[in-house]
């Protein structure tokens, strides 16, 4: 599997997990209707999900992750 596909898959998995957590977490705390709850959860998950990117360095591809609120970039 290509590194780009792995990075895309990891982005979707992290977004999906955070979306479900925020949807049920915010849904239990605030009595919102269906659409604002989904949109708010999607916005929160997109801002707080780690971003996986393929970085080409010296002819090799590496997956790096940028975690929100952390200034350094982690290499996988």
Image (spheres, rainbow, N blue to C red):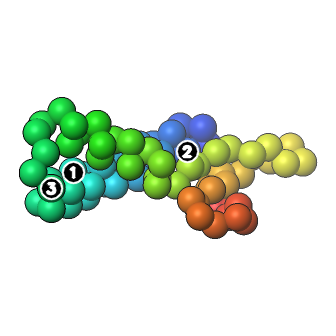
Q: Residue furthest top?
A: 35
Q: Residues within 10 Å of mark 3 (few under 14, many from 20)?
A: few
10 on left or right of 22: right
Question: Residue drawn 56% across and 59% down?
Answer: 68
Mark 1 vs mark 3: in front: 3
| Among the two numbered marks 1 and 3 on one chain, the one whose residue lies closer to the N terminus | 1
9 on left or right of 54: left
User: Which residue was labeled with disc 2?
Assistant: 7
In the rendered view, would you say 40 is above or below 27?
above
Question: In front: 55, or 26?
Answer: 26
Report which quarter residue 40 is drawn in: top left
Residue 33 placement (x, y as % from top left): 11, 39
Q: Residues within 10 Å of mark 1 (few under 14, many from 20)?
A: many
Q: Residue furthest right?
A: 58
User: Which residue was labeled with disc 3?
Assistant: 30
User: Which residue was labeled with disc 1?
Assistant: 23
| Among the two numbered marks 1 and 2 on one chain, the one whose residue lies closer to the N terminus | 2
For residue 20, say whether it is visible. Answer: yes
Question: In front: 24, or 56?
Answer: 24
Question: Residue drawn 68% across and 44% down?
Answer: 54
For residue 1, say whether it is visible. Answer: no
């Amino acid at each position: 599997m290509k590194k780009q596909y792995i990075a895309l898959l990891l982005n979707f998995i992290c977004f999906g997990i955070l979306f479900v957590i925020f949807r049920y977490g915010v849904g239990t705390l605030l009595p919102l209707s269906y659409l604002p709850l989904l949109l708010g959860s999607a916005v929160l998950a997109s801002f707080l999900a780690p971003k996986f990117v393929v970085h080409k360095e010296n002819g090799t591809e590496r997956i790096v992750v940028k975690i929100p609120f952390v200034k350094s970039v982690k290499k996988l």
